[in-house]
Amino acid sequence: MASFLEIADDEKGYDLDHFCVPRHYENDLEKVIIPHGLIMDRTERLARDIIQDMGGHHIVALCVLKGGYKFFADLLDYIKALNQNSDKSVPLTVDFIRVKSYCNDKSTNSVKVIGGDELSSLSGKNVLIVEDIVETGRTMQTLLSLLSECNPKMVKVVSLLVKRTPRSSGYRPDYIGFEVPDSFLVGYALDYNEYFRDLSHICILNDQAKEKYKV
Ligand code: IMP
Ligand code: MG
């Protein structure tokens, strides 16, 4: 099973006052639960683990938009650094797909794929799917079954976060950054109705903000 860094249910997190948080979000957040620096340090190690396993073959990194874009960019930077500084290196190409399954703070039953290149171009390739967070697992399971129709050579999934929740289908990614409590998280490209992507740290949203930004 993939190793991960566990953020406990009773994790106190960090007071907002100790970090730089945009003024416009100051009253919307309960606490910082994963500071940006820790995200980066964990991502660096994930890059090493992935290259150790998948290295040797050309990798197509598939970014699941929009929530995955920060993690995708930072993970690829670390993979690039490994490629630049070791004897072994792997060619890396990128692709993007957009999915939407959330409204307010609830996962909906429909997982919509609303963009991206032709998935058929992934045929015969080693694909690394890069996702921000797995909650029920439905998004990833839908994406994996779509992808399998295109006959890639290998598919691995890396998710920065996995939520501990009774709503989980049991699906687990191949690589996991952090396992997190069952709260609604925002920041580092994770959004609530499109807000909070412009926040560096991963934070817990407060109930007031759920009302304020509700659609
Ligand atoms: P799943 O299909 O239930 O596994 O949900 C996965 C998708 O829901 C993720 O890719 C996110 O876009 C979104 N999501 C799930 N939990 C959160 C959260 O706590 N904050 C922000 N987005 C979330
Ligand atoms: Mg996502």
Image: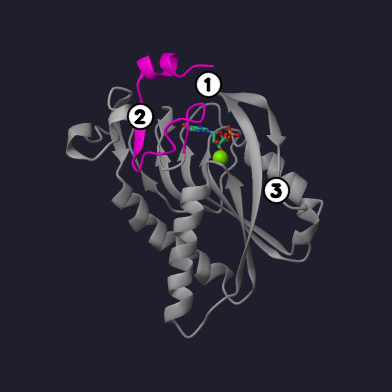
User: Which is more foreground, mark 1 or mark 2?
Assistant: 1
User: Which is more foreground, mark 2 or mark 3?
Assistant: 3
Q: Nearer the viewer, residue 129 or 76?
A: 76
Give me the residue at 65% from left, 42% from top. 98
Task: Looking at the image, tell me whether mark 3 or mark 1 is earlier in sequence order.
Answer: 1
Q: Are marks 3 and 1 in contact (CB under 8 Å)?
A: no
Seen as rendered, the residue at the extreme left is 18
Mark 2 lies within 8 Å of ligand 1 (Cβ measured): no
Q: Name the residue under label 1.
A: 104
In this picture, is 117 found above or below 192?
below
Q: Is residue 196 magenta?
A: yes
Q: Quadrant of the C terminus?
A: top right
Give me the residue at 69% from left, 62% from top. 154
**Is residue 1 in view from this perspective?**
no
**Is residue 16 in view from this perspective?**
yes
Three-letter residue code for mark 2: Ile
**Mark 2 Cα within 10 Å, few/some/many (few <14, many 20+)?**
many
Task: Looking at the image, tell me whether mark 2 or mark 3 is earlier in sequence order.
Answer: 3
Q: Where is ligand 2, by quadrant? A: top right
Task: Looking at the image, tell me whether mark 1 or mark 2 is earlier in sequence order.
Answer: 1
Which label is found at residue 116?
3
Q: Name the residue under label 2.
A: 204
Range drawn in magenta: 190-215
Q: Which of 66 and 32 is in front in this view?
A: 66
Q: Does the magenta stretch include residue 65?
A: no
